[in-house]
Amino acid sequence: MEAILKTKDLQFLYPAVEEGEKATAALRGMDLTIERGSFVVILGHNGSGKSTLSKTFNAILLPSAGAVYVKGMDTADEGSLLDIRRSVGMVFQNPDNQIVSNVVEEDVAFAPENLGVPTEEIRRRVDGALAAVGMSEFAQHAPHLLSGGQKQRIAIAGVLAMEPDCIVLDEATAMLDPAGRREVLSTVHRLNREKGITAVLITHHMNEAEDADRVIVMDDGRVVMDGPPREIFTRVEELRGLGLTVPDTVDLLDRLRRDGLALPLDALSVDECADAVAAALG
Ligand code: ADP
Ligand code: MG
């Protein structure tokens, strides 16, 4: 498998702002390899370093020590910057901060225009990107009139117009209602499945990690858990100790187990959980 993102003893320090203050060590030595085509979810309580890590993936931040490689390119190598920015697209939390134009299709065209992509090619990419996020019929609409979920799908389309290898979403569903969250999540899953785009999703919503290939849990600038969701979410006490919740299904199974029912902990989806409970009671 090809490593699309790789970090080697990655460390990051935010320098002290005021005299006498200490620098903040946000990343304390991370060794991660993310494979092309995978769907990875990153969890961790506030301040554990998730956003800092994600910003090192496309050279918004450069390591204080260690290194980050995108498709083998060192993010500290200025000559690769454009290629890196094109390869790893970022979607952030606040949809409104990511809108740069008054018309949806102009918004989606913004990045490729800045990259000097020829006009006909931009047309093709914008149409393709809007279709990929299911927003073609909104091409002429005003972005600020859309719902939160639709705005985030436009932000994703803007990233897709760069034809990236990897898309990184930093709490991109945090400001959305449940319907908006589902829209964005299913869009990212579809892009991953159908176009092979590597997805790195940072989230607070445990159920968004259910269908990931891999879950990485961070604490205090380090990786503390790393594995498939079914393995990670059975480690209930460990997750709680890290200040995290578990998916509702696991929480229910855990409580019923404490009440003496013989149940597995890895029935993650609602259907599996319901079947497991029915079987245990039956
Ligand atoms: P998360 O996204 O997991 O909440 P962050 O990467 O935002 O974590 O933060 C990691 C650590 O770095 C925290 O201690 C946070 O206070 C600190 N930090 C984040 N951004 C800055 C900044 N711009 N300046 C100084 N410290 C920061
Ligand atoms: Mg963050």
Image: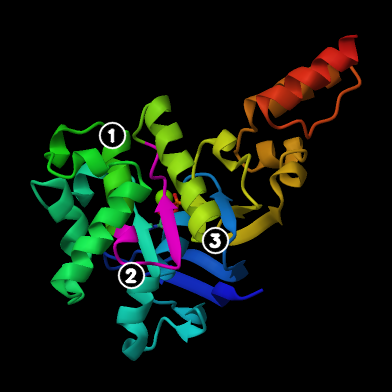
* Residue position marked by numbered label 1 in the rendering: 148
Q: How many marks?
A: 3
User: Tell me, what colour scheme is on the image?
Assistant: rainbow
The mark lying in front, picked from 2 and 3, is: 2
The image quadrant that residue 125 belongs to is: bottom left
| Magenta run includes residue 164 | yes
In the image, which residues are magenta? 159-174
- Identify which residue is drawn at 69% across, 54% down: 225
* Residue position marked by numbered label 2 in the rendering: 60
Q: Counting other residues with Cα less than 10 Å from the Cα at mark 2, is it few (<14), some (14-19), or many (20 or more)?
A: few
CB of mark 3 near ligand 1 (< 8 Å): yes
- SS at badge 1: helix
Q: Earlier in the sequence, mark 2 or mark 1?
A: 2
In the image, what residue type sits under mark 2? Ile
* Residue position marked by numbered label 3 in the rendering: 221
Q: Is residue 209 above or below residue 264?
A: below
Picture coordinates of residue 280, whole percent (x, y):
89, 15
In the image, what residue type sits under mark 1? Gly
The image quadrant that residue 128 belongs to is: bottom left
**Contact (CB < 8 A) between labels 2 and 3?**
no
Q: Which is nearer the eye, 95 or 255?
A: 95
CB of mark 2 near ligand 1 (< 8 Å): no
Q: Is residue 156 visible?
A: yes
- Identify which residue is drawn at 48% across, 40% down: 186
| Magenta run includes residue 38 | no
Q: Which quadrant holds the C terminus?
A: top right
**Contact (CB < 8 A) between labels 2 and 1?**
no
Task: Give the number of the disc on residue 44.
Answer: none
Picture coordinates of residue 258, whole percent (x, y):
84, 19
In the image, what residue type sits under mark 3? Gly
